[in-house]
Amino acid sequence: MPAESHNHEQARLEALRRYQILDTEPEQAYDNLARLAAFICGTSIALVNFIDENRQWFKAKLGIDVPEMPRNVGLSYLCLERKDIVVINDTLKNEQYAANPAVKGYPNVRFYAGVPLVSPDGQILGTLCAIDPTPRELNQQQIEALSALGRQVISQLELRRNLAERQRTEAFLRESDQRLKLALQAAKLGSWQLDLKTTELSASSQCHINFGLSPEVEFTYNKLLECIHPDDRSYMQACVREAIENHGDYEAEYRCIWTDNSIHWILARGTVIYDADNQPIRMTGVTLDVTDRKQSEEELKRQNLRSQLFSEITLKIRESLQLEEILQTTVKEVQKLLQADRVVIFRLWADGSGTVVQEAVLPGWPVVLGQNILDPCFQEDYVEKYRQGRISAIFDIATADIQDCHKEFLQQFGVKANLVVPILIRDGIWGLLIAHQCAHPRHWNNFETELLLQLANQIGIALSQAQLLEQETRHVQELARSNSELEQFAYVASHDLQEPLRMVTSYLQLLDRKYSNQLDATADQFINYAVDGARRMQNLINDLLNYSRVTTRGQPFVEVNCAEIVEQAIANLKFAIEDSGAEITYNHLPIIKADPIQLTQVFQNLIGNAIKFRRDIPPRIHIGVFRADEGDGGKGGQGKNYVSTPLSPTPNSPLPTPHEWLFSVSDNGIGLEAQYAERIFVIFQRLHGRSKYPGTGIGLAICKKIIERHGGRIWVESEPSQGSNFYFTIPDQTGQQS
């Protein structure tokens, strides 16, 4: 490795170790982020992954059993190399990716989307990745959402480290208290001493700083009480009394109000000193400004609440897509989390008006649920700005730089401050998610804005998915109805044709018998044409009836011995086999669950076709079987090479999945060109004229429909003059072999 690359890697590893995250216990916040990444990308696997010298360690994992993997396994190295998000729709389309052990083996990666986890100093610590064993694609919104989650992982790391640092500081203070009852060595520790008889207080300059006082201000006990938040004064005094009465150490954590009215948190610790008569005479101790720690704790708490809220909403989206329930949960939880007076979801209409479709409002404020509202300002350019992703955070409606019409509109609902984010779907803007403060103006911080924005994104995803589900449901219902009508039409039409065709055939046969050789050659020829046409029409109707009855008149699946099925098919074709001199062989065949009549028809059609489409040599037909998870079971097959046939499958042939039987019917006939491999399974599709190869063109379509009814697939591999291999699969529902 070049020296420069080595130095970069060492710097990266040092940055990772500073977070002390490796080999730690699972944490709910990271698990929630992994679940949310899987939901956004629609994958079964998601990982929060940190990369050290030799391994990838999973802080959070969904859909995978192992806690870590070697560094060179998987595709996360691409994020390190490219220093950017990586999305691979299908790993098998790239030889390099396809050769990766995680693609070839567990967890069989076909789709990969990874976001580099970049620390504030620019070092890549690992990845947030979404993985799936099937190919898929992401839209731009999903990619942006995944990137936002990656930043959220880093935020969680930073909060975790800050909190750990604060906890270590407090641990140090406790240790120092045990030794000297003072902690003057720690940064920003103010020392103090209180005379319990005179209440005279002496304090260091750092104490002045911690309470927001200038050094020249006299820091008396009364001044101390004046600085402490009114709601916390009695608590602090109770802690002092308890320490004195119990001969214990004094500790209190309370709020103080600085001269600029800002709120700060103070951690005070001390010890009581007694005289010879065991009477308390003074207390001595230290103070520490722990505002940053308290803010970190509050931020971490809010982050956890937000993750919990995301999880609840995304779970509802995944479980039901009941939009009303999702929207109702959103407004209620946001109202509680933000402590807002009102939270609404506003559905926008094309003319700029809208309807409040969900609302959570505190008692005492106007209820607007269900109201159709028209803000005159929305008829101008407001909607377009929101369509472009605008976020509006107004601290004070009365003094805000907004149009008078919009100000008057908000004031009629008692709004003093509001926060508005758009709900966007694929086709544009759907509506708005709005938080109102009615009692007083309010500053909206980044957490609150980000929370509302991400929830609006989740609502947009839910709306889009609900639309897709509705379209798909309508399409499936229409397709089922169409298929049912077509099957009914085919059955009725072919059934109703039977009797008149039978009469036509009978009279034609009477004409043939009575007037044969009594008319001229042309008349005899016409009669022969008519008799032959009627016979072919009879065959066509019978095949059409069989085709329409595959799914509607099929028999229940039972255990059948495939060897007996093949023997029955051979017996049905006895005369054709004898006339052609065909030789039919087969492997030791399994016992499977199937419709015996339909399975016989499949083998009979495939063997019959092999006899019909033969060359000028006797047909040689072989029936083989293979199963991926058991090879040939030691029963005479050829393992991964399928069966001994004149034409071997190509490397691109679809292999059976585990617990699935693959059957082959191979011949040495005329074959066909690859371009016709799909066409021959379409009903009425023929590659040859009836004069050369008779038939209705329905046989293979029936085979396809039967195999699909059994949950399998059917296809052909062939070359002209080289014979054909017909393959079909049937799931193994018995777990047995004969």
Image (cartoon, rainbow, N blue to C red):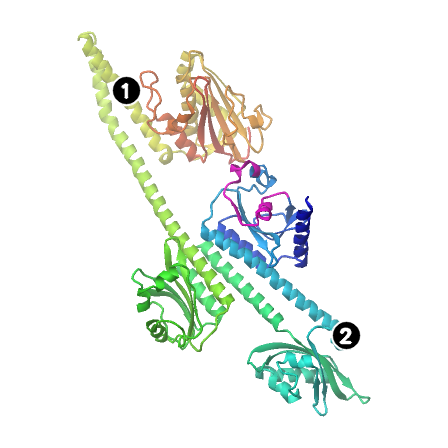
- The residue mark sitting in front, 2 or 1, is 2
**Are the residues flagged by discs 2 and 1 in contact, CB closer than 8 Å?**
no
Residue closer to the observer: 599 or 695? 695
Three-letter code for the amino acid on which mark 2 is drawn: Gln
Give the image location of residue 627, x and y in percent: 54, 31
Q: Residues within 10 Å of mark 1 (few under 14, many from 20)?
A: some
- According to the picture, the residue beneath numbered tag 1 turns out to be 535
Report whether residue 375 is seen: no
Q: Is residue 350 above or below residue 672?
A: below
Residue 542 lies, with reference to residue 24, above or below; the image says above
Residue under pointer 2: 178
Say whether residue 57 is magenta.
no
Q: Position of residue 148 (x, y in %)?
A: 51, 57
Which x, y percent locates residue 363? 42, 76
Q: Residues within 10 Å of mark 2 (few under 14, many from 20)?
A: few
Residue drawn at (57%, 28%) of the image: 640
The image shows residue 293 at horizontal and vertical percentages of 62, 70
Looking at numbered disc 1 in the image, what kind of residue is underneath it? Arg
